[in-house]
Amino acid sequence: MSGDTLGVPAGGNSDRASVVGLSVKTKLLMAGLAVALPILLSSCGSSEAPPTQAAATTPGVLVEDAWVRATIGAKDTTMTAAFMSLTNPGKSDISLTSATSPVAGMVQLHEMSMKDGKMVMQEKTGGIKVPAESHAHLAPSGDHVMLMGLKQPLKPGDEVPVTLRFSDGSSHDLTVPVKAFTEEEEHYHPSTTPSPTP
Amino acid sequence: MTGRPSRRQLFGYAGAAAAGAAVTGGFVALDNDDPVVVARYVDPHGDHQPAIAAASPKHAELVALTLLPTTDKAGLGRLMRLWTNDIVALSAGRPAPGDTAPELSVPGVALTVTAGFGPKVFTMPGLVKPRGFSEVPVMSHDRLQPGWSGGDLLVLVGADDAVSVVHAVRRLVADAAPFAKPLWRQTGFWNGTGPDGQPVTGRNLFNQVDGTGNPAPGTPEFDSTVWSPDGWTSLVVRRIQLNLDTWDELTRSEQERAVGRKLSNGAPLNGTAEHDELDLEKRDADGRLVIAENAHARLSHHSVNDGRRIFRKGLNYVQDNGPTRESGLIFLSYQADLVSQFLPLLARLDAADALNEWTTTIGSAAFAIPPGFHEGGWLGQKLLS
């Protein structure tokens, strides 16, 4: 099987499916990009960004490099995680506050933390903060978007729609590729896993 | 991972953001403290896939893949979106999403990826073959080996650094696994930089300056040679063995006569500088044509081919097998219309080229190269939507 675009009606919206990180909120994104250039360059160089430029618009969060871990072959095929990089070119912190996906009964924002010497996963209260002029990297063993109550196993080559909502009121509709990845077994299958409530 | 980003992470994003500035694939200095260190970033976005008009990479690998029977038009679309994501990340020096070895992706190595579709793709229902695209027929001098020929998809990765090329190929091939499997791989190298750091034409392993006759990128001549009106081009890949042993038995003047150019700088035998015009009528004191009747430069010159031109690129290769080494050239030809521009030229060279005595083509493949993609778009979007 070479996979499917999941969670979209038959006939699909693949015409309109945009590449991850480049959502339908194109205008917002482009504004973000235009401002991102001077600020991000300044953050690793010496030149100073003109402060008025960022104040002129309120750029949203830029989403890049999103992917979802395949569940085919996993012990538990009802849950997985989405990972991505979030960049906030603006002057104020923005948080990823929630996410939804038609392939999952429930989606939560999770963090990993040490508890009694063991790495455990728990819901991240207040969402995932993307600091001003900086990044948040959602990656295996770190913060992630947890997809629970999956309606079907996800295999490499599939695409899943994911919608992200941010504290500045913006949202991003993503089409996220499913990729194979060998995960540390305990990370996403801890005994304390909250049972999904679709 | 949400803490203070590392310097490297910021570089990755700065590289991505600089895309808007470095529209022409320009040079981005990453380290202000050391002006000698100039890292290169080629913006993956644009009307055309950017590597085609860019200088030849130092290191490159081509992988042809065969589509799995289950891969339909929709699946091919998913693969192209997947690859597009990977290309954007890898070009900026970020790991491809889901990379299991993320530290192997580094910025500043001018990494480029070019993707194309083989003839079989256009037999899928609803997919229209670009005008002038076809397979390349077997020529009389060809000794094709199936292991180097054909393919339904092509990915061509180039960079200043071989590690980066190998790693990018590993990711692109791994991510393609649900859709396609490799058919052949070819690794090559090219030196397109002179001792002063300036771009030069580069040499094949026959010691010939190779590619002098090309139209220059950025000129109307280049555009009309390479791009079809809807932004496609085609790429012919031919693996050509060079028999260095018998070539080395020739005198230098015999070698120059076979190609019609001077070995020292690529100048036509009637001239002194590389880009001097060929004088195809000029004769020496004995009445012999200075550029011989069967010289490669004459037979491939556009003035004797009804003005037909191609845009040639090359990669040297070596293939080792125990103590023996095969040497050759991965011949790459880009043209808007393969049928009307490339095939007549190939037939002419096959029939008479003096170089045929020392060269044997052992692999041949043709790919239609879709236009580039812009922010929010993906490779082959118009074809596959």
Image: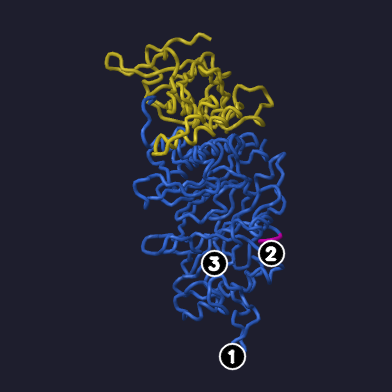
Chain colours: A yellow, B blue
Mark 3 or 1, which is nearer the eye?
A: 1
Instruction: Report in which chain the residue with disc 1 lies.
Output: B
Instruction: Report in which chain the residue with disc 2 lies.
Output: B
Q: Which residue is the site of mark 3?
A: B360
- Does residue B92 appear left or right of residue B138 in this picture? left
Residue B371 found in image quarter: top right
Which image quadrant: the N terminus of chain A?
top right
Q: Give above or below for A188 relative to B38.
A: above
Q: Which residues are magenta?
A: B340-344
The amino acid beneath tag 3 is Thr
- Residues A23 and B305: in front is A23
Same subunit under labels 2 and 3?
A: yes
Q: Which residue is the site of mark 1?
A: B285
The answer for how far apart the CA atoms under marks 3 and 1 are is: 34 Å
Image mark for residue B61: none
Q: Which SS class for mark 3?
A: strand
Instruction: Report in which chain the residue with disc 3 lies.
Output: B
